[in-house]
Amino acid sequence: MAIRLGDPAPDFEAKTTDGSIRFHDWIGSGWAILFSHPKDFTPVCTTELGAVAKLKPQFDKRNVKVIGLSVDKVEDHTKWAKDIEETQGAKLNFPLIDDHDRKVSGLYDMIHPNASETFTVRSVFVIGPDKKVKLTITYPASTGRNFDEILRVIDSLQLTAKYQVATPVNWKDGEDVIIVPAVSNEEAKGKFPKGWKEIKPYLRVTPQPNRN
Ligand code: BEZ
C-alpha cells in the first residue's frame, strides 16, 4: 500500500554497507531520509550517490541521517562504492541497504510495476523524529533528483515543526516565512517578537524566526 504523509514509517531490519540495522533504532531521535536507487552500477544513481556524499555535512547540520537503498546485495554495493569514489570524487559516507529480496522496497511501495517490474523508482522519504513520514517524492529512474531541493524542504519542515510557520512559493533559507493560520494574532505577538506584515488576515509574513 502507498505510504502517505503523516503515516508511521514502516520499521524493518536490513543488511547495509555499514552492517545490520533496525531502521527506527538507526534513526534514533533525529530526522532521516531514505531514498531508493533502481539498481547498482547504473549511471544516474552513480552521480546521485556521489552528490549526496558531498552534501553529507549539510544533512548532518540539520540532524538528518541519510540512508540509500538498492535492490542488489551488499557485496555489489561495496564494489559499486569504489566506482562512485573513482568517478564522482566522493567516498560513500552513509549506509546503502541490501534489498535484493525487495523486502524494504515492498514495504515502502518503491517498485511501480507499470514503470518497471524489477527496478525501484527514485523514491524519497523524509522521516521526522516521531518516525512519521513528512515528505514523499517520486522520480522516474531516468531523472536524477535535485538534492538541494530536498535540503530546502527539510529546512521548511524543521521550521514548521519548531515555530508554527509555513514557507511560501520558491522560499529559500533566510527569506520571510508565513505564520500558519492556526496561530491567532494574539498568540503571534508572543511567538514572533519581530512582528509581521498582514497582507490579508490569512497571509501574515514574518522574518525567519531562527535568523538575526
Ligand atoms: C540510472 O541510474 O542511470 C538508471 C537506472 C535505471 C533505469 C534508467 C537509468
Image (cartoon, grey):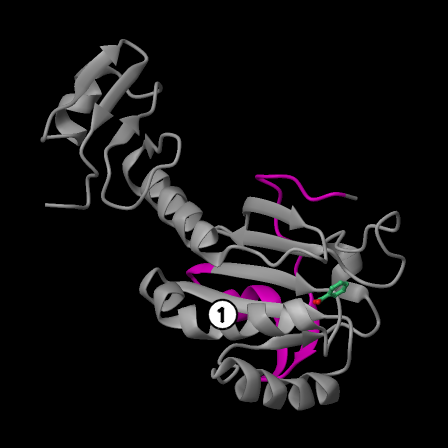
Q: Is residue 110 above or below residue 39?
A: above
Q: Position of residue 119 (x, y in %)?
A: 81, 63
Q: Quadrant of residue 107?
A: bottom right
Q: Amino acid at mark 1?
A: Ala
Q: Is residue 14 magenta?
A: yes
Q: Residue at x 16, y 22 (%)?
A: 196
How far from the left and from the top, in percent, is residue 30?
A: 42, 60
Mark 1, other Cα within 10 Å: few <14 / some 14–19 / many ≥20 = many
Of 190 and 32, which appears nearest the observer? 32
Relative image position of residue 165 (x, y in whole percent): 31, 32
Q: Judge whether residue 196 can be spotted in this image.
A: yes
Residue in view at x 43 percent, y 55 percent: 148
Residue ID for mark 1:
51
Query: Seen in the image, is 107 located left or right of residue 66?
Result: right
Does any portion of residue 28 appear in the rendered image?
no
| Relative side of 204 to 161, left or right | left
Residue stretch rendered in magenta on the structure: 2-31
**Residue nearest the viewer, comparing 101 with 8:** 101
